Amino acid sequence: MKPTAELLQDILAEVAPLIGQGKVANYIPALAQVPSTKLGIAVYTNQGEVFKAGDADEAFSIQSISKALSLTLAMRLYEQEDIWTRVGKEPSGQAFNSLIQLEMEQGIPRNPFINAGAIVVADLLNCRLSAPRQYLLEFVRQLSGDTHIVYDKVVAASEMMHGDRNAAIAYLMRSFGNFNSEVIPVLENYFTACALKMSCVDLAKTFSYLANKGISVRTGKRVVSVTQSKQLNALLATCGLYDGAGEFAYRVGMPGKSGVGGGIIAVVPGDMTIAVWSPELDASGNSLAGTRALELLSERIGRSIF
Amino acid sequence: MKPTAELLQDILAEVAPLIGQGKVANYIPALAQVPSTKLGIAVYTNQGEVFKAGDADEAFSIQSISKALSLTLAMRLYEQEDIWTRVGKEPSGQAFNSLIQLEMEQGIPRNPFINAGAIVVADLLNCRLSAPRQYLLEFVRQLSGDTHIVYDKVVAASEMMHGDRNAAIAYLMRSFGNFNSEVIPVLENYFTACALKMSCVDLAKTFSYLANKGISVRTGKRVVSVTQSKQLNALLATCGLYDGAGEFAYRVGMPGKSGVGGGIIAVVPGDMTIAVWSPELDASGNSLAGTRALELLSERIGRSIF
Amino acid sequence: MKPTAELLQDILAEVAPLIGQGKVANYIPALAQVPSTKLGIAVYTNQGEVFKAGDADEAFSIQSISKALSLTLAMRLYEQEDIWTRVGKEPSGQAFNSLIQLEMEQGIPRNPFINAGAIVVADLLNCRLSAPRQYLLEFVRQLSGDTHIVYDKVVAASEMMHGDRNAAIAYLMRSFGNFNSEVIPVLENYFTACALKMSCVDLAKTFSYLANKGISVRTGKRVVSVTQSKQLNALLATCGLYDGAGEFAYRVGMPGKSGVGGGIIAVVPGDMTIAVWSPELDASGNSLAGTRALELLSERIGRSIF
Amino acid sequence: MKPTAELLQDILAEVAPLIGQGKVANYIPALAQVPSTKLGIAVYTNQGEVFKAGDADEAFSIQSISKALSLTLAMRLYEQEDIWTRVGKEPSGQAFNSLIQLEMEQGIPRNPFINAGAIVVADLLNCRLSAPRQYLLEFVRQLSGDTHIVYDKVVAASEMMHGDRNAAIAYLMRSFGNFNSEVIPVLENYFTACALKMSCVDLAKTFSYLANKGISVRTGKRVVSVTQSKQLNALLATCGLYDGAGEFAYRVGMPGKSGVGGGIIAVVPGDMTIAVWSPELDASGNSLAGTRALELLSERIGRSIF
């Protein structure tokens, strides 16, 4: 069965009652103020069709979804071994910001989607790009076709003010020799990337290269190689949902990446990308209603990688 | 491209030079004595074709591959919640036999494929089946069509003699209220299941239900529901390769389950099952040449879930 | 200032109001039933005088205080290196029954007073004595002069029924090669030793060798060498109070050993031994009113090792 | 038996052969260059006598011994609860610079002598003193009577350059709300304090208040109260020797504090202070020959707290 706007509408109606059972991220005020009733979904097919429902055109803070974009950029700029000697490819098996594992594993983060790993990726980008923030902004504007995408500077500044734990992570990695830049500027880049504001439609279009063997459906240009596209999907499938990757695979069955802003991007390789948004999170930090919406969509259209 | 016997032969020739770079499991004598030069592969398609090369018909100790079979049986016998309240669905992020995580998470194992989780599954089977070992044996004989499959009693006894750590795991879970039987008999069942001797051809046929939406290709009978089949594949993809699940997804891109005997079973949903065997293991405890053979096969036939 | 019965009476009156602020150990019914209002103290000087107040003559379950007796026996039976290669001498820095540290440190317990260490000591005694329980019983009867001391079989049996965690500890150590006997019989000995019933007066007399350079004040016989006596006091001072050794040293300033039955034995080397009993425990598992009574006594008589 | 210069000489001769079996700290060049053959000892009695041997008058980097001085200052400036709500009093049971425990215990360091705890103390001093470094310098000059004591600026700068792990510790504590100043200036104060250069004679005199109920033997002035003096000795006895406190108590039987520069200060309450120096360290980071010298001295003069 094909996705349609009606199907998406039905799904949103079905998951709406979940609102109230999760918890909006509140570690910074700017995120805590987002209305918990926001709910949107967008599908972008490999044929270039857009289907959407709810608040699919409203921009929100993509937060950790940006980690998949930063890794894509790093894979374009570096040889494989330059990346994977500094960060692993394995699920973390722990809360997404734990220092314990990082210390036990000698400063090598488990994967590029936990904070420590994303900070290593930010360090990589910082060493090779003269203006990493501008570069990332142009990248998403081009892939999505939305020239109005911006960083939310209030969010970025607020994250930085609450960023002591991430500073601890960066310094710990530097003590193990796995960090090459000054800590503070890299953290600023990292928090700024997390503060990208994008809509579900923006996100679904931006990530279309992961559903289309590395080529952006919208621009027709190659973003990553076929192999890199598979590799990125593999990393998303095993590590993309914090400490809930197994549950997400079990229920949804798609590679995906979530953010504490309540967004999730999911990929059906060869078929489509899907973006959902609902700010309330479950215990693992993933959008509660968003995950359920993806689960229903997977069932209804009969698509999953398994 | 389709798999053929020639392709499989070529792949074995290509990976053979890796032999010597891994390490045969030696924690029990019976496994340590297996010649490291053994090398086999078998493909079983959803059309019922068998392709094979090398030592594909020689039986070996399937070890942890049995955990996927035991979980399949448990999913047939129990409601979902009876299983998933006692064992998680998340990658472990630690060495496959660590007690640390088990203690920190109050006796609930991370997933059914680490030792602790498989021992919980053995406890579940023990509580519902009058003769769990006989039941499992008949299950694999029927699915594979090979009535000569047996348990290797020397291996089972040897494992039991070196089973103190698994006894510690079981007692620890019992102290948290997550173990309902006597420890020793359950461990005997657990070790006996691991001591199943099967060939690559046996394994590929046995697991065909995971590639065929829950229906055994060989018998035409339903083993698990469509949804359960997807769930099992999801669990294999995120948790099936010990501490190397991420790397395996990145390189091979198929749900899989490995054993320290050097076997790996992999699934291309909708298409085929593949079994490889090469006793030498990599640092994560997965067959070194076997993983590489699956990686090459995935490339050559252009099949992966990503 | 010298201890007197009046002083002890005053101290008990002063600490009595603390009763109600702690928590009686309730992991086994037999301990949970002890009235929380019990309160006793006894001092035994190196001149052989006994001073006492409150329930000083009532026998209670000495629990972990027995670990100091078992270690004393082991030090009499074994060379130093036979003991200290199998168990450490360092504070554990963790909850007293944690398996985490034991796994990280390869099955070598931190010290002989955490459960793991005491189980190693029980294994040592089991390997050298034909009847360890009878031997220990005669040892305390002789040192205290109280021939009515017995094991509480109900307590011992109850502990054994709740002993899964200790079984896990023993099996884990055996998996590391640090356990030489059958697990179950050693655990029975261990739990039986913990189930010794002794009064404050019994305990103060029994441990007098630690205050008197290794010679029992009551019998005049040497129990351990001068050096061993110092070593035992050093171990009590750094490791004797579970996870509260530092706090106890800070407030009381005496080597000591506590049990979850609410007893504490303390030593003023060269001077006296003191035993207190009050069943309610603080967060570290040490007698709440008992610790305070020792702190007051230390202040009033101006005795401490610091 | 009384200490004499001859006795000290004999002891140094006896421990000298140990030189070569330990390892000079080499994490910063300035420490690595200290000749491993340096060996000195000084005793300062409560009667004001000085006995010394070897390199007892040569100044060396006192490193972590400074943590006992900083804590003394903090105890003079703050109420008890202001200190002990922010740092514990328990042995750490782990390597002295581990972040794992700090994270598990919510940013509250185990005790004031591990790095994390000493950094909290530095934060406390920074919040109350306008010039903490000058204040500490005057404190030791006055207590020792040696006006030539200085900070080694090369050492301090070198520590700061290798201080990433300590920065990680400070940021982690700040993320838990247990750090009130800017991180970098406090670390500079902390490393500067560690870079104090003092001789064995200086150290023995400086710490005389711990042997003399809080009053400096040299100046006759009260440094801390009688109770605080006992408390400081208790903390030294249980936490002063990194991960070797239990072993030190077992062998030497005195409260003490060591530094990676190879110095150790030890206290016999009511009697004397002793300082030793030998740069080679044992596996726990304590002076190898220095510990043995203290052990021999304790045996020969028959003094220990046990």
Image (cartoon, coloured by chain):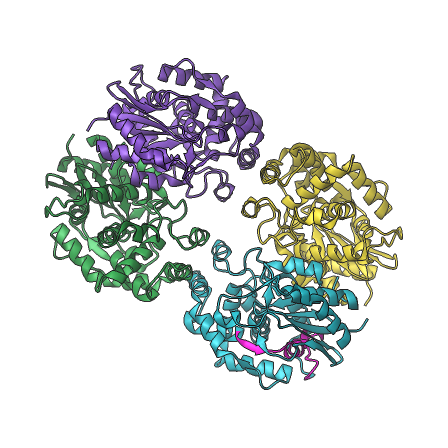
Chain colours: A yellow, B cyan, C green, D purple
Q: Which residue is drawn at 60% across and 83% down?
A: B141
Of residues C227 and B231, the one nearer the viewer is C227
Q: Report the side of D77 relative to C9 (left or right).
A: right
Residue drawn at 69 percent across, 60 percent down: B249
> Is residue A233 one of those drawn in magenta?
no
Give B211 or B221, whichever is nearer the viewer.
B211
Q: Indicate yes or no whether the magenta region holds residue B211.
A: yes
User: Most extreme residue toward the right, as rendered?
Assistant: A220
**Farthest residue in the top direction?**
D147
**Residue A66 point in image, percent of width and height:** 73, 45
Residue C248, given in percent of the width and then of the height, sits at: 31, 39
Residue C175 place in picture, x, y as percent: 42, 62
Please provide the residue range marked out in magenta.
B195-219
Residue D182 at least partly seen: no
Which quadrant does the N terminus of chain C fall into?
Answer: top left
* Viewer-proximal residue among D88 and D23: D23
Residue B85 percent coordinates (x, y): 54, 63
Pick whichever, A290 or D192, lies toward us. D192
